[in-house]
Amino acid sequence: MKPPSWEGAVMTEKVMDNEQLEQETTHPLNGGVGVRLCRIMLRESHRLLKNPIYGFCMVVFPVLVTLFFTSMMSDGQPLDMPVGIVDHDNTTTTRSLLRRLDAFQNSEIVASYPTVAEARRAIQENHIYGFLYIPKGTTDALLSSRQPQISFYYSLASITAGSLVFKDLKTISTLGSAAVGQATMRAKGFSDTQIQAFMQPIVVDLHPLNNPWINYNMYLSTMLIPGLMMLFMFLITAYSLGTELKFDTGKEWLSMAGNNMLLALTGKLLPQTLVFLAITFFYEYYVFGVLGYPHPGGVLMMVLLGVLHVQASQGFGIFIFGLMPSLRMSMSICSLWAVLGFSMAGSAFPIIGMDEPLQALSWLFPLRHYYMLYQICVFNGYPLLEAWFHFAALLGFALLPWLVLKKIKNAMLTYVYIP
């Protein structure tokens, strides 16, 4: 007599499990779509509270990033950049010139060097960002109407600091000859009006639009902070879907939604959406309300931009996971795309100055469309019609999950997690 077959017992148990799963899916007590949606939302809310990764990436880090960048550049632009001097003339005229340079807002004389070689070494060691070299006999040449040479050197290893120092050094070099010329013309009996017309025949009337303070914070923080928040949204979306595969809970998640992938995704991501919207509106209130950044586009446009920001980010994260249903690969691609978005947004370097392939590639980055929509409709106050293409692009990113719903469902039901 043969012993009972264990293979048949295992197969019977497997069939029973499938039958139980089918009964659980179709049981009338499971309720309709609203009840299923609420159950999935409660399940996801419990996960958000239980796993500290969600709390840090969705709340703590975005708030810290907002406070960090807005406080780091709270003065608007760098002040008192350290510069040095090499004054071989050392006269009353040159000392007056140096006092004017030290009085400039962006420059501060921190050291005097005996030779040009030592001053250059100080630049290379990053002690100063530039220096002014005044050779011996400069004052005598100025008073005798000759043309002495005043040299200045600056470092562009830091573009912002080097540009500010260059502006001050060039200005003070021009003022040196102008001061002597003004004194000479006044001694010859010219009036102040005549002197002004001769020294500065063309007067520049400068009006920076929307940012008259030339505040770096107003155009850097409004790109960096949303870009970092977009990075967190990408990663959290891909992470929350990838963990369903990693811990083999995808079948349970789908069964709660009645095998409806759209319902499952909606219930899973809706709690995250609400948290991200709250953080986004906090950022907008703090930046535009508390700090007073210009926003002639109005509050409604900012709210619309915030909603598009969150929906496009989550849609892109779902799409990347659908293309590569792997926790590691999807998070890697999301982080890479978010980091490249900072360069392709067009804030630090204009897109029109890039090569044509890069200009075409820039349309594939959500941050580019967010920044353009903010710049056109919020910062400059133009109607939404002027930026309809960027609005449609963000809406398209939000709708990308429709293309991968079946693939995500197939991954949850059949894929085996590989570390």
Image: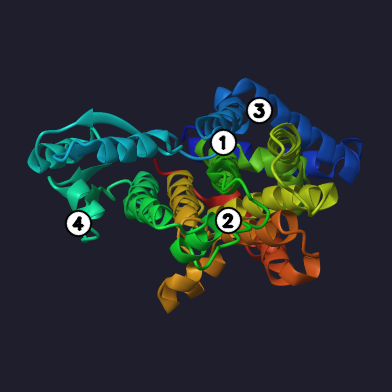
- Marks 1 and 4, how far apart at CA: 102 Å
Q: Which residue is mark 4?
A: 148
Q: Which residue is mark 2?
A: 367
| Residue depth check, mark 1 versus mark 2: number of the one nearer the observer | 2
Residue 35 as seen in the image, left or right of residue 336: right
Residue 173 vs 365, above or below: the answer is above
The numbered mark at residue 9 is 1
Kindly indicate whether the residue at mark 4 contacts the one at mark 1 (C-beta within 8 angstroms): no
Q: Is residue 259 visible?
A: no
- Residue type at mark 4 is Pro
Where is residue 81 drawn, in percent x and y?
A: 36, 36
Residue 129 as seen in the image, left or right of residue 356: left
Q: Secondary structure at mark 4?
A: loop
| Residue depth check, mark 1 versus mark 4: number of the one nearer the observer | 4
Foreground residue among 15 and 188:
188
Foreground residue among 240 and 364:
364
Residue 344 as seen in the image, left or right of residue 280: left
- Residue type at mark 3 is Leu
At 35% from the left and 48% from the top, the residue drawn is 172
Kindly indicate whether the residue at mark 3 contacts the one at mark 4 (C-beta within 8 angstroms): no
Q: Which residue is mark 3?
A: 48
- Residue type at mark 1 is Ala
